[in-house]
Amino acid sequence: MRNVLKIIMVIICLVTNTACSGGNDNPDDENPNEKGGLGGVTLIFPDNNSECTEGVSLNDAESTITFMWEEGTNVDTYEVTVRNLITNNINTVNASTNEKAISLTKNTPYEWYVVSKAAGSNQSPSSAKWQFYNAGTGVENYAPFPAVAVSPTRGQTISVSGTITLEWDATDVDNDLNDFEIFFGTSNNPTVSIANTTQRSTTTNTSSGQTYYWRVITKDLAGNSSRSEVFDFKVQ
């Protein structure tokens, strides 16, 4: 009887030790090099869809703007990307604080966003993307921001051929948008105008197995205009 009790006690100890050594209630211990809570930051300045007049003028062509955003949680460094919406040239710089001075061309529209980074983390969340006009000397009315594709999105594959709807969005710091001209075709530089409209959508015909390209020319009441990038989609 004593031998049976000893065997039972040994089994209980083994089971207890196995359970204790196998568990881990602290997720940080499982990935000691992974920082938690890394999130995308909120942008502050320059404001979205605005004219930025607070830059420091360097000369007739350039000014320096100090970009600002809220501090991120557990962030070590930030990567600031600024894209010229006319030339599509991209400038990416690193920042150790939540602001960065960058020199830009005047009278030019830009898009910007911030990526958060931390040592030991495989996360790199991005902020929202904002756009603004860097003010130009003596400019009274700015061209609209280039339109962006809403549907179909760039690179999208759609399963239905025939008549489809092209949809886009556009903004203007002067709030004087007038109309849009749409170029569409199978060339990656579409030159066939298929619509002039005050709406932000138009319909066109497509065929299966084709890749289509389109762009939008946005015009305002002052006679200014902007060209969007070329958007593409494929029809199955």
Image (cartoon, helix red, strand yellow):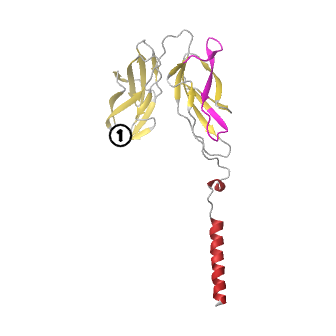
Residue annotated with mark 1 = 208
How crowded pointer 1 is (Cα within 10 Å; few <14, some 14-19, many 20+) is rated as: few
Q: Is residue 213 magenta?
A: no
**At 66% across and 36% down in the image, what residue appears?**
77
- Image quadrant for the N terminus? bottom right
Looking at the image, the residue that sits furthest to the bottom is: 1
Q: Quadrant of residue 5?
A: bottom right
Q: Nearer the viewer, residue 150 or 205?
A: 150
Q: Nearer the viewer, residue 200 or 44?
A: 44
**At 66% across and 41% down in the image, what residue appears?**
118
Q: Position of residue 192 (x, y in %)?
A: 38, 24
Q: Position of residue 166 (x, y in %)?
A: 37, 31
Would you say residue 85 is visible in this rendering?
no
Q: Secondary structure at mark 1?
A: loop
Q: Nearer the viewer, residue 175 or 178?
A: 175
Q: Is residue 64 magenta?
A: yes
At label 1, the amino acid type is Ser
Tell me where the magenta segment starts and ends, as one range: 52-79
Would you say residue 233 is visible in this rendering?
yes
Q: Position of residue 152 (x, y in %)?
A: 40, 35
Q: Position of residue 59 (x, y in %)?
A: 65, 12
Q: Quadrant of residue 16?
A: bottom right
**At 61% across and 37% down in the image, what residue appears?**
72
Looking at the image, the residue that sits furthest to the top is: 138
